[in-house]
Image (cartoon, coloured by chain):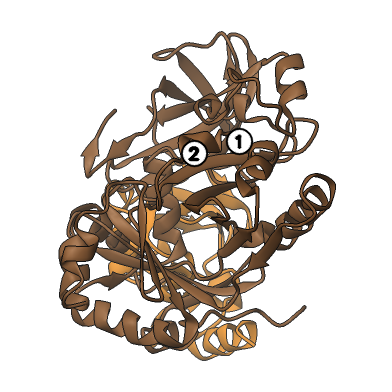
């Protein structure tokens, strides 16, 4: 599966999408869901929580294991995706469609510090060797 | 790291795009795409597992029965006809579990045991020490050249007969927990899923052909991931998690497998009679949202306990666990489980959670 060119990525396998309203949507990558297997539980941060970059803020659990999700940039949680909480398997079916939560960035320029698709691809390959 | 061991079916797993992992030093399939789909197939149709990493061991010679009466906690006198199987723990002197195993009675000078992959070397060494002490003339023969395939599910029998034309008259009469030897195939009506099915031992060279015949008959390959959720739903202990060398069978819900009534003196019996039983193994059903996992703390009105196996149950669409908690906590009681920074509510329930495709909680 190809890595969408219009998204940004982290080394801890989150994807980040800048929305029209200036918020950013966060999910986990196709590669991450493939490693974890069938998703059965999603725990999102509460709306209004302020996150530092790299802070543990959500958990995804597959049948196999629990895995932390980290804030890709600093910001305040402005929305959580209840559909994904109700049907975590949506992450397996469409990882880049299944956003988990949205952040209002403290500083929109922080997005520039994230990986682009090519850099993320290289990161995934380096981890699998 | 040492090279991982391969079963005779490793190539078949690769052909099927299995996700392979290190399991007790063996490269084994964890799933072939979706663990939950594989789980559900075994509950509703038929799936198969490569369990060739487990080790069959034949014990042969005069007086095998007497030796096993010393070696294991269950009473092999329950085995009186050829092919009959018995589940038992093998204990050390302190009452802790060296391993759990299945014992098949073949004849008075031949019993077959099947032990866990991760314990195989330790078990053989333990058995040899005991043999040298109590029955030096017996032969202990690990059968590493045998492959083992478990075909499980409500349609396992039907599909096995399709895969092996002509086998129905020989295998249909096999009752649960019994086995027959058909040529070089040892066919047992046993399993680790809570469903009907067979565990079949056969020569390693024949295993890939047999696996392919089962595939052609519509039996789906299933990985160790599904095997774990199936056995957990079926309330079956996993050695190394739910019971260990530091827990006795009486603290693991396995009193039914320990014969303390007869005069027979088996290894570990003194300790079982002497040690107070302060902990019990119970089932937990999570009432809040989340997933129970091994080693999470359980808080009860009688004190703390620990989850020994926990997962999401695909059949119940809820999280379940086996937990070792203080005695005095009863079925139906509510307890709390610490998951990350939260305390979630769970109910103490009877297990098995699922049997023959039906939810029991």
Q: CA distance from mark 1 to mark 2?
A: 7 Å
Classify B147 as above or below A101. below
Chain that appears brown = B
Q: Are marks 1 and 2 on the same chain?
A: yes
Residue holding disc 1: B296
Tell which subunit mark 2 falls on: B
The tint chain A carries is: orange
Q: Position of residue B224 (x, y in %)?
A: 46, 63
- Which quarter of the rendering shows the N terminus of chain B? bottom right
Question: Mark 2 highlights which residue?
Answer: B292
The image quarter in which residue B22 lies: bottom right
Q: Is residue B317 visible?
A: yes
Residue occupying the point 19% across, 58% down = B172
Q: How many marks do you count on the picture? A: 2
Instruction: Give me the residue at 29% from left, 42% from top.
Output: B317
Instruction: Give the left or right position of residue B98, taking residue A114 as reference.
Output: right
Most distant residue in the front direction: B62
- Foreground residue among B75 and B10: B75
Where is B193 relative to B306, above or below? below
For residue B144, side relative to residue B15 (left or right): right
Q: Secondary structure at mark 2?
A: loop
In the foreground, B286 or B149 = B149
- Mark 1 — on which chain does it sit? B
Is residue B325 shown above or below B340?
A: above
Look at the numbered discs 1 and 2 and tell me whether their residues touch, using CB distance below 8 Å: yes
């Amino acid at each position: 599966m190809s890595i969408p060119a219009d998204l940004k990525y982290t080394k801890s396998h989150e994807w980040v999408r800048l929305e029209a309203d200036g918020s950013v949507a966060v999910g986990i990558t196709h590669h991450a869901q493939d490693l974890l297997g069938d998703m059965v539980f999603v725990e999102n941060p509460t709306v209004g929580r302020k996150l530092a970059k790299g802070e543990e803020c959500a958990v995804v659990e597959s049948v196999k294991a629990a895995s932390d999700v980290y804030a890709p940039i600093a910001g305040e949680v402005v929305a959580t995706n209840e559909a994904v909480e109700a049907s975590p398997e949506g992450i397996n079916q469409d990882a880049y469609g299944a956003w988990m939560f949205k952040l209002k960035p403290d500083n929109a320029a922080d997005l520039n510090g994230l990986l682009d698709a090519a850099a993320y691809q290289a990161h995934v390959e380096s981890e699998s060797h | 790291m040492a090279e991982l061991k391969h079963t005779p079916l490793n190539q078949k797993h690769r052909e099927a795009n299995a996700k392979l992992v290190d399991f007790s030093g063996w490269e084994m399939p964890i799933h072939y795409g979706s663990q939950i789909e594989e789980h559900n197939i075994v509950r509703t149709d038929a799936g198969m597992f490569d369990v060739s990493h487990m080790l069959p061991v034949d014990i042969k010679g005069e007086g095998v029965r007497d030796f096993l009466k010393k070696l294991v906690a269950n009473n092999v006198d329950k085995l009186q006809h050829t092919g009959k199987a018995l589940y038992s723990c093998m204990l050390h002197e302190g009452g802790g579990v060296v391993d759990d195993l299945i014992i098949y009675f073949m004849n008075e000078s031949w019993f077959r045991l099947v032990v866990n992959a991760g314990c195989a070397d330790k078990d053989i060494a333990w058995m040899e020490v005991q043999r040298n002490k109590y029955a030096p003339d017996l032969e202990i023969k690990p059968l590493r050249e045998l492959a083992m395939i478990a075909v499980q599910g409500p349609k396992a029998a039907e599909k096995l007969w399709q895969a092996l034309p002509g086998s129905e008259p020989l295998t249909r009469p096999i009752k649960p927990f019994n086995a027959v030897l058909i040529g070089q195939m040892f066919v047992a009506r046993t399993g680790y899923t809570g469903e009907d099915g067979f565990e079949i031992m056969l020569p390693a060279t024949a295993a890939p052909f047999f696996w392919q015949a089962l595939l052609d008959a519509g039996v789906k390959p299933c990985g160790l991931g599904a095997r774990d959720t199936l056995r957990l739903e079926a309330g079956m202990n996993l050695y190394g998690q739910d019971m260990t060398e530091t827990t006795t069978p009486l603290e693991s819900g396995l009193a039914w497998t320990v014969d303390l009534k007869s005069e027979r003196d088996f290894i570990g019996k003194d300790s079982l009679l002497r040690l107070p039983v302060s902990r019990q193994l119970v089932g937990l059903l999570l009432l809040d949202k989340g997933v129970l996992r091994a080693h999470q703390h359980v808080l009860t009105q009688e004190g703390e306990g620990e989850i020994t196996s926990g997962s999401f149950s695909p059949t119940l669409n809820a999280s379940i666990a086996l937990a070792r908690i203080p005695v005095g906590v009863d079925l139906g009681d509510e307890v709390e489980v610490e998951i990350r920074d939260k305390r979630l509510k769970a109910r103490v329930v009877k297990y098995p959670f699922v049997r023959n495709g039906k939810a029991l909680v």
